[in-house]
Image: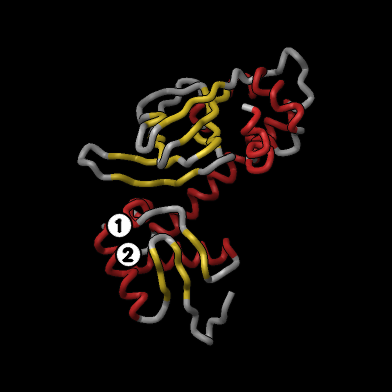
Amino acid sequence: MKEYLPIIKARSGLFRGIEESELEKLFGCLEARKQTYRKEEYILREGEQTKVLGLVLSGSVLIVQDDVWGGRNVLSVLGPGQCFAEVFACVPGSVLNVSVEAKEDTTVLFLNVGRILSICPDGCSFHAQLIQNLLIDMAQKNRKLSEKITHMAKRSTREKLLSYLSEQAVKNKSSEFEIPYNRQQLADYLGVDRSGLSVQLCRLRDEGMLTFHKNKIRLIYKDSIGMI
């Protein structure tokens, strides 16, 4: 675990305000266990229950919903330092309505949420901070879901794509950025057909509104709009 401590401290909002020297004691308190998954392997499946949240240590995961006809809705992609399944783990008996899949070879740290929410028998000084961080993390996840709903509420594939790319430009404070999805994953995230998405990307490129190479995008603004 020691090799992951700098990543956890630097990237994980769950441990914000907690000293690196306290992390090993905290992991013992939260019954932490580490597990590695291969690319496209399921970490958690829809319909299961969980008492633990997962923290990505390396690699990345997809949060997805699959239907019985093979359709897929990508809700989000999470990288090192980000958590998943915390909402379901906080509600006893809650059944997952999403699956978690390794986007690439991935290592995950699992933490017992019950030990976070209950009063620590050892009187750990960092316990209150951990609960506060967990609430902030869940609020941020809710905000991201609202952003996805905003994109999907647009009527056409073109409008959904432009809404998403505009949001990414604002977040990155640049007209050039890299998105975390490949073409199929972006189509799944926006709830559109992959071929239709590819057609719209090419049309936007031909219209001089953007350029792209794989998942790297550069938006081209007209003078009336200005540059970021």
Residue 74 screen position, x and y as percent: 38, 46
Residue 133 screen position, x and y as percent: 67, 36
Residue 136 screen position, x and y as percent: 64, 41
**Disc 2 residue type?**
Thr
- As drawn, is 168 to the left or to the right of 155? right
Q: Residue at x 27, y 58 (%)?
A: 194
Disc nearer the start of the sequence (1/2): 2
Number of the label disc, if any, that sits on residue 39? none
What distance separates the C-alpha of mark 1 from that of mark 2? 6 Å
Q: Is residue 194 visible?
A: yes
Q: Residue furthest bottom?
A: 223
Mark 1 lies on residue: 192
Up-down: is 47 above or below 187? Answer: above
Q: Residue at x 49, y 80 (%)?
A: 221
> Looking at the image, which is closer to me, 40 or 111?
40
> Looking at the image, which is closer to me, 206 or 149?
206
Helix, strand or loop at label 2? It is: helix
Specify the quadrant of the image occupied by residue 49.
Answer: top left
Q: Residue at x 30, y 45 (%)?
A: 72
> How does the figure colour the protein chain or chains?
secondary structure
Mark 2 lies on residue: 157
- The reply to whether dot 1 and dot 2 touch (C-beta < 8 Å) is yes
| Quarter of the image that includes the N terminus | top right
Specify the quadrant of the image occupied by residue 7.
Answer: top right
- As drawn, is 170 to the left or to the right of 102? right
Helix, strand or loop at label 1? It is: loop
Q: Residue furthest left?
A: 69
